Image (cartoon, grey):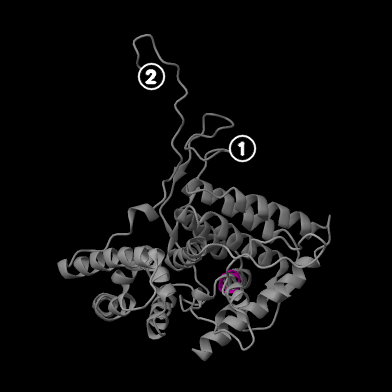
Amino acid sequence: EAALLLEYARAQETVRYFDGALLAIGSGSELHRCTRELSLRVNQIARVHKVVFERSAQIVSALCSTAAFDAAAEPSLGALGAPVPAHVAFLARRVVAQGGVLIEKQPLAAVPLANVVARVASALPPPLGSALWRAVLCELSAACCYTVPCFPPRAAGQSLDEWKLALGYKNLAPATAPGGRPAPVRLEAKDKYYNRLQGFVTLFAALLASDAYIDFDLGCGCFDRGPHETCVTCGSSRAVSRSPLPISRPDEGERTGMRAAWRWLARLLNLPVRRVTVVLLGPFLDALGAKLLAAYGRQFGKLLEHVALVFMPKVRATEGLQDEERGSLSRLETIVSGLRETLRAGCAPETHEALLMPLFKEEDDTRDEGADGDW
């Protein structure tokens, strides 16, 4: 557990380097204009393959056409130890921040965000692609310690509220109280905290699960083509999808693929059982269970057996379980039962339908209603 806490501390240190670098970006500079473009494109990401294709291309163009100083240069993650330019650090922060806002309420928003990261990293020159993976993983670890996974202990002299803030709870109190005095801490509700944790874990799982992306022949050179099959500008050109292309991973998946997913599960299940653990495990297995089953087969089956026969009984025996934890336990039981049944039946595991994206957004039907009532 000490090694995991050290990994978390290193991620936090790297993110602090990013803080200083991003503050140093001058207003009105070329780099500042690049960050505004990146922010716009991340905000426009939607759960449609054509949108992911276009936004990724725009992000790659912005990154490659802008010179940037390094936000963090010290190697710390092996194959992912490339220097991180400031605009890459900014993109990573925007993606993780967007994930924290959207995925809490719309878990499926993790899929296009993760696909954009993997696609952009594959399209960039290898040093930049490696830097993007490194920056996103560091930002994600700093935002949610459970993606390491680790459980920072309560320090000597640390109040309960201070400890919870260190674990990622939000302080809803204003910065100052009337009279300029510091306002007392007002922590968010546990269910809000858990929802955000599940969002970050879902984003982490979606990043590890991204294994292919789809290219398109857009058929025209219009700047704004829209998310539909037919270009919204010229109204005539129709986009055509091409065969999926594999994601390029700088470390062959050691920290960015199935091996990282297996290691995260093994780490989590080897740590002492805590109430929050069951909250984390469900969304991770829901997003990655089919891929882990395809990659590891009966070895993964043994891990599922451990979850069902050892881990879940320990959770049930934990004192003070609340509605949030009981609901997560019930969901986990359903997920694990389904995966074990698939393995016993010898069926090929299928990716959860909800994790799949449509090629295009459906065209809106704007025809007038006819006299006979037909559209």
Left-right relation of 113 to 309: right
**Amino acid type shown at disc 1:** Cys
Q: Picture quarter containing residue 101? A: bottom right
Q: CA distance from mark 2 to mark 1?
A: 30 Å
Nearer to us of marks 2 and 1 is: 2
What is the residue that sits farthest to the top in this orientation?
371
* Picture quadrant where residue 262 is located: bottom left
Q: Secondary structure at mark 1?
A: loop
Q: Residue at x 41, y 64 (%)?
A: 324
Residue 272 seen by the camera: yes
- Residue at 82 percent across and 63 percent down: it is 180
Residue 152 in percent (x, y) is at 55, 82
The dominant secondary structure in magenta is helix
Residue placed at 45% from the left, 75% from the top? 253
Q: Can you identify the residue that label 2 sits on?
A: 375
x 62%, y 89%: residue: 156
Whole-percent x, y for residue 279 in the image = 41, 68
Reading the image, the residue beneath label 1 is 222
Q: Earlier in the sequence, mark 2 or mark 1?
A: 1
Dot 2: what SS?
loop
Foreground residue, 175 or 54? Answer: 175
Left or right relative to 226: residue 341: left
Vertical relation: 102 (above or below) 271: above
Residues rendered magenta in the picture: 136-142
Give how far across and how far down residue 174 sits, in percent.
Answer: 71, 60
Disc 2 residue type (three-letter): Trp
Q: Residues within 10 Å of mark 2 (few under 14, many from 20)?
A: few
